[in-house]
Amino acid sequence: MSRTAQQKVPKRITVPRWLLIISVVLLVVFGLVMVYSAGSIDALKNRHGDMAYYFKRQLFFVIFGLGLIGIICKVTPMSFWQRPKVLVGIWAALVFLLALVMTPLGIEGGGARRWIWVGFSLQPSELARIVIILGTAGLLGIWGRGQDFWANPYEDPMRRSLRFTAIAFIMLGVPCAFVFIAQSDLGTTILILVAFFAALWFGEVDWRIIAILGLAVLAIGAIGILGSSYRRARVLTFIHTFGQTDIPLTDENRQSRNSLFALGSGGLTGTGLGMSREKYFYLSEAHTDFIFAIIGEELGLLFGTIPIILLFCVFTVSGILIAREASDMSGRIIAGACTTAIALQAILNMMVVCGLFPITGKTLPFVSYGGSSMLSNMIMLGFILKVSFDAQQPNNANVALRKSMRVMDGGERETALEPRRRSRYVDADRQRREADSQRRYDSQRRGDDSQPRFRVYQGGRSGHDPDRDRSRR
């Protein structure tokens, strides 16, 4: 895009984009520093004495993620990710990777088998949120245009609705079954469902349908938790120890209690960067799931935890604003759902560290060490930025809608209809048809108005011809 075209991009599009980029850059830099600090002791002991092992690995994944963002934003158009064949292909690839975890190719760690080796340890379930978001956006986009994968306009609407529901159920149910049942990963299952419901919400699906689906998911989740002794014990331990400080340390509550010890010992200003005591093997997973506790211990409330929370708030608000300015419904769903998925993962991680939620094993986005998590979050960030860049194109749906709203005074003045004043999105094709129809109507009016229909004569009343009135008398 030329420099002149860039200067014409309104601030409502550029400001949220820059705030989003700045917040992510600060989070990533902050995370690299804290990964080095929190993981140095573990790396010194278990990684051949290389204190910077986790830092260098994390830096590699950050650079790799930036390359993926460039591919998403500059190489592949958004329409590519909405093609039915592409959606089916990436969903099948996800299911294949999830199935590989259950084979001898899977890698076990922490008592669970959730990874496969692809040059590095990849957790396929981290990619499930992205596939579910893209699939839901594609289905709702096809549904909103009155189309179907089979493009049969004469089909019975009830039959088409049932097939649409069946496709959505299979698209969501199969990955969740692998993650929740086969891999026993409750935290990732929660995040996948959050991404799905966020996509439905930004797709403006009827709230009653979302409520019914939510209740069904809660019922299935309750059955799954109560039916597993491991999950049931973890939830009961959380309930029995919540808010109590006089309970002795046990294997079940040791991690949570040490996390609170780290946050409490940090106070307002912290013990100093690199001066954590809990990372000396008192608090396990200090550089991954519980890095927020080390941040609170070393940098304190004022310089550590509050800035992290504020950066995630800026990220969330910016992503929502980008979703509001999206050029079409699919872009709105993708940007809004990706933002919600990352924000909810951050909230879930911080709640676990603060003892407000049972331990789920989820990382802090852009901050914690973890290649799969970093790549997954970077891919979602790439889609958010792609939606923002598409919103500034001159022929997007918002521009067509604004051009279709003209003032009928015989001139060419157009009203500036702000997107925030619209309650619902309209399909881009229908907007263009309405705009063309409005332009034809305007041209016809200008042709009919070649002779003035309303004249004022000196000394007479407006709209009356004295000679014509005298002849009538």
Image (cartoon, helix red, strand yellow):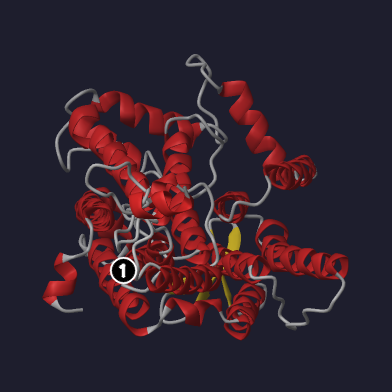
Nearest to the observer: residue 185 or residue 193: 193
SS under mark 1: helix
Which quadrant does the N terminus fall into?
Answer: bottom left
| Image position of 138 with respect to 226: above or below | below
Whole-percent x and y of residue 384? Answer: 38, 62
State the residue at coordinates (47%, 69%). Answer: 441
Residue 18 percent coordinates (x, y): 21, 56
Residue farthest along the left direction in this orientation: 3
- The answer to which image quadrant residue 269 occupies is top left
Q: Is residue 225 visible?
A: no
Residue 261: where, in percent of width, then height? Answer: 36, 27
- Please identify the quarter of the rendering in which residue 268 is found: top left
Residue depicted at 47% across the width and 16% down the height: 245
The answer to whether residue 27 of the structure is visible from this angle is yes
Q: Categorize mark 1 by other alpha carbons within 10 Å: few (<14), some (14-19), many (20+).
A: some
Say which of 85 and 466 sits in front: 466
